[in-house]
Image (cartoon, helix red, strand yellow):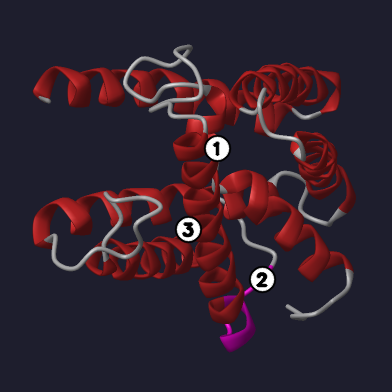
Amino acid sequence: MKEEFLKRIISSILLIPITLFFIFKGSFLFNFFIIVCFAITFFEWHLMTKKISYKVIGFIFLIFSFYSIYKIRNTFEGEYWYLLFITIICVSTDIGGYIFGKTFQGPKLTKISPKKTYSGMFGGFLFSIIIGNYFVSSSLISSPIEFTLNVFIFVFVISLVSQIGDIFISYFKRLSNIKDTGKIIPGHGGILDRIDGMIFAFPASYLILSLNILYF
């Protein structure tokens, strides 16, 4: 367990600056980055759903999901800011869920994903709101918005969607009788294991932002 956790930490330390580099740089470098991630995710979904008749729906969804990532990075004011903000919401949701779930444990959230607990769900919401508020208020990166009630609702909704996406992919992994979607990231599994919540959070964010469902 400790060895697996150490691998997870080291992988995260390497992945975070690489991901931030491409998000900040934008242009063709960012496009190249998301194309590579899309191709690997597409392949992992293909391997995982060989025996599932409606896997084509998953392919279509992945196309829309990565398209929304591209649009968020290149459409809205603030360039990389919104993409980085949504990514931080998802990552802090994962971290909060992991810490609270391991620390407090308690009742299981669903049979689909046995490791998910109500305490982990609460921790995911709590961390995403705290870190989201800090990110918006921080002077390190100039924020185009303030942490208003609408932003609070946005963070909560995206955290919720991210957690649902995590459970959704866990459901398909159970159907396929596999633990991880791949082995490309030590301690994490595949790319799809790492971004399972994000591929749902980004389309939801894109729709909210583009349709002005929550204006901020």
Crowding at mark 1 (Cα within 10 Å: few <14, some 14-19, many 20+) = many
Q: How many marks?
A: 3
Kindly identify which residue carries mark 2. 145
Q: Position of residue 63 (x, y in %)?
A: 84, 36
Q: Secondary structure at mark 2?
A: loop
C-alpha distance separating marks 2 and 1:
26 Å
Q: Amino acid at mark 2?
A: Ile
- Is 135 situated left or right of 44 in this image? left
Please tell me which residue lies in front, 16 or 165: 165
Mark 2 or 3: in front is 3
Which quarter shows the C terminus? bottom right
Give residue 195's mark.
Answer: 1
- Is 161 situated left or right of 127 in this image? right
C-alpha distance separating marks 1 and 3:
11 Å
Q: Which residues are magenta?
A: 145-151
Q: Amino acid at mark 3?
A: Gln
Q: Amino acid at mark 1?
A: Ile
> From what the image shows, is residue 171 above or below residue 55?
below
- Is 68 situated left or right of 123 in this image? right
The residue under the point 65% across, 52% down is: 200
Crowding at mark 3 (Cα within 10 Å: few <14, some 14-19, many 20+) = many
Q: Quadrant of residue 145?
A: bottom right
Residue extending furthest toward the bottom = 149
Can residue 37 be seen here?
yes
The residue under the point 30% across, 55% down is: 116
Give residue 163's mark.
Answer: 3
Q: Secondary structure at mark 3?
A: helix
Disc 2 to disc 1: CB gap under 8 Å: no
